[in-house]
Amino acid sequence: MTYKVAIDDLVRDANEEEIAALELLKEEAKQRKAQFEAKAAAKAAAEAKLAALGLNSDDLKALGL
């Protein structure tokens, strides 16, 4: 993949070091997204379990949990 780097008015192809850094940033972003989605899925599952018990998050807060 070719990346372009813009510095002021100069646009050029990225060098190997810059490409490696960009690829690392891209991979880290994918990992953060996966962690966020996993956390959201776990929260939804927990809320579904609470709903099955007839509770919601406000009930837990009222109980101090």
Image (cartoon, rainbow, N blue to C red):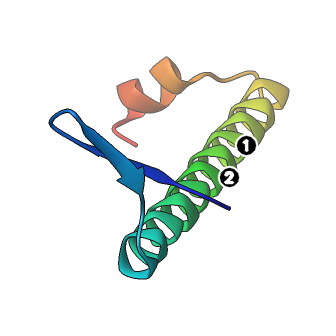
* Residue 60 percent across, percent down from the top left: 48, 32
Q: Is residue 63 above or below residue 6?
A: above
SS at circle 1: helix
SS at circle 2: helix
Give the quarter of the figure containing the C terminus. Answer: top left
Q: Is residue 19 above or below residue 52?
A: below
Q: Which residue is mark 1?
A: 41
Q: Nearer the viewer, residue 39 or 65?
A: 39
Residue 64 figure quarter: top left
Give the quarter of the figure containing the N terminus. Answer: bottom right
Residue at the far left in the pictured view: 8
Left or right of 13 in this view: 46: right
- What residue sits 68% from the left and 52% below the top? 38
* Residue 22 percent across, percent down from the top left: 45, 63
Label placed on residue 9? none
Q: Which residue is mark 2?
A: 38
Q: Are marks 2 and 1 in contact (CB under 8 Å)?
A: yes
Q: Is residue 22 above or below residue 15?
A: above
Labels in figure, total: 2
